[in-house]
Image: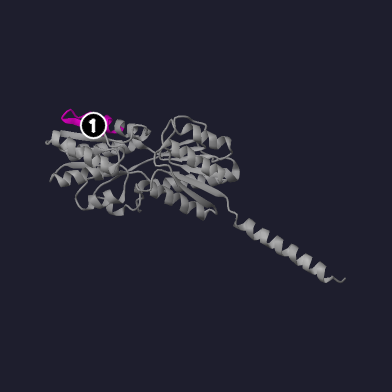
Amino acid sequence: MTFTRRAFVSTLAIATALSAAGIAAAQDKPLIAIITPSHDNPFFKAEADGAAKRAVELGYDTLILVHDDDPNKQSQVIDTAIARGAKAIIIDNAGADASVAPVKRAKDAGVPSFLIDREISESGIAVAQIVSNNYQGAQLGAEKFVELMGEAGNYVELLGKESDTNAGVRSSGYHDIIDQYPDLKMVAQQSANWSQTEAYAKMETILQANPDIKGVISGNDTMAMGAWAALEAAGRTDVIVVGFDGSNDVRDSILKGGIKATVLQPAYNQAQIAVEQADQFLKTGSTGLDEKQLMDCVLIDESNAAKLETFALAD
């Protein structure tokens, strides 16, 4: 059997096209969108880094987006993820109530969401809500705070963003322990909205009005760092400060004898677990687990701070 030159060229063109299509198909990896608040906060950067690393290991492309804790921007970036053909969304959301509608919109578009760090106020919309056990962690931090305070003295509480359920849960956990000690008196309680800059300013004002404070318990490490900077500037390094998150910045402060303790919530590992569950869901239609999942927190102080790295504790 013989081929004409035209038939040979035609066959070669078909083979080349099929080969190119095969290469393109091989390169067309499914996409996972990873959405968090601003990476200016190292906690949220650790979430994004952990999720992206695990997604790539499992054979996915990633689309990393931020919503800056702005519900309107969150709505826009979720629409972007849907439009870009994301197969799943990993998200640390921008508010328990404000996030329900966009997460449902993603579900209706066939894009399952896997929440980390923060819950939303409705069940059955996200496939998974994987969050730190904030109440358990806050109790750990409060117990250490009480010990450091010697069960007595005036103290200040810095609260997180009011729209974030974690802020309320942590505060409740703190007070369910601290309020058992009548000689511990809260002289100020203010929100610094998870912000280091705002915590610095609030701490300056509070210190002027309450120069006899002995301790500060903070809803997160970023605010704890702001409070500590204000205390240092005022020459009040005798004040006991306890945070919550397990950041490298607070780790370093603990090792230098500054901030006394924090509570580690495993941001990096939590984000990786969310990706693993997304992968299983996409392949099997189920994670095999309940929607709401809690991960316990760990107290970090001078005894184990050296083992802390990027929101994970080395064995």
Q: Is residue 178 magenta?
A: yes
**Which quadrant of the figure has residue 148?**
top left
Q: Is residue 142 magenta?
A: no
Query: Residue drawn at (22%, 28%), measured in percent from left and top?
Result: 180
Location of residue 241 in the rendering, given as x and y in whole percent from the top left corner: 21, 42
Front residue of 142 and 162: 162
Please provide the residue range marked out in magenta: 173-190
Residue identifier under label 1: 189
Q: Quadrant of the N terminus?
A: bottom right
**Which quadrant of the figure has residue 222?**
top left
Residue at the extreme right of the image, as rendered = 1
- Look at the picture and state if 206 lies above or below 81: above
- Look at the picture and state if 26 lies above or below 280: below
Residue 29 in view of the camera: yes
Query: Residue drawn at (16%, 47%), measured in percent from left and top?
Result: 232
| 43 sits to left or right of 6 | left
